[in-house]
Image: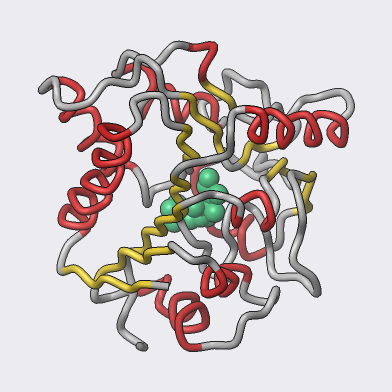
Amino acid sequence: MEVRIFDTADEIAVACADIFTEIIKNKPDCILGLATGASPVKTYKELIRRYNNGEISFENIRTFNLDEYCDLPRDDKNSYYTFMHENLFNSVNIKEENVHIPDGNAADPEAHAKSYDAMIDAAGGIDIQLLGIGTNGHIGFNEPSDTFSDGTFKVKLTDSTIKSNSIYFDDDSMPRYALTMGINSIMKAKKIVLIATGEAKADAIKATVDGEVTPMCPASVLKNHPDAILLIDKAAAKLL
Ligand code: F6R
């Protein structure tokens, strides 16, 4: 696992967009694994800028998102479907049929999760997976646990995640469950890039980089991946 430390989130966005640009240029029909949340927003802005410059095209790209809340209408302002369209898809030439986000309202979440993994495999696997990290070390919505998860599954969110993400929701309306790619689905990606900024992530980054590989800090598993890069700022790197 490689760790690169930057002064600012803007520098991280450029570095991350550089990695994506290289892959997109080498393989215009590549498969991107995408994340939501605050961490990737600047990277998406930079990719949109490069698309507008004519540097990259999304015409033949297929995307698979990490996760989606359960029991939230797809067009809710807080759904990850809405987030991805507002922050990336509406501003580039991706084809809607090439966009994949787990369906948090699937009648049979287990069957849907299986078919989501099967679709990723059928597409040839993810060429590059973008990740953020929770303050508790989660990646996707793989919360600290006794075992590493396998494929996509329905997860009960922890109090720590509910506390971090409920700032986006009115009242107490944040969903308690989500569908998420599992650790094994994430680890199958050919390349993984994780972004972390700010002091709130310092403990999780310390456990990921310097701690043992343990499902109690799900991101620590990235140490077992042959091509994982952490792009972090000085505040997130503070305890290293
Ligand atoms: C989002 C996701 C989560 C976030 C993590 C960090 O698709 O899977 O793991 O990456 O919760 O969120 P931010 O970036 O908002 O701090």
Quick one: quadrant of the C terminus?
A: bottom left
Q: Is residue 112 left or right of residue 28?
A: right
Q: Residue at x 44, y 45 (%)?
A: 128
User: Which one is nearer the viewer's eye here, 218 or 226?
Assistant: 226
x then y, percent, for residue 103? 70, 27
Tell me if I can see residue 199 in this picture.
Answer: yes
Q: Residue at x 22, y 26 (%)?
A: 56
x then y, percent, for residue 153? 78, 45
Quick one: quadrant of the N terminus?
A: bottom left
Tell me if I can see residue 165 in this picture.
Answer: no
> In which quadrant of the rendered view does residue 88 lie?
top left
Q: Residue at x 46, y 42 (%)?
A: 127
Q: Is residue 202 above or below residue 173?
A: below
x then y, percent, for residue 160? 62, 65
Q: Residue at x 24, y 75 (%)?
A: 234
Q: Is residue 210 above or below residue 160?
A: below
Q: Is residue 155 above or below residue 92?
A: below
x then y, percent, for residue 95? 44, 11
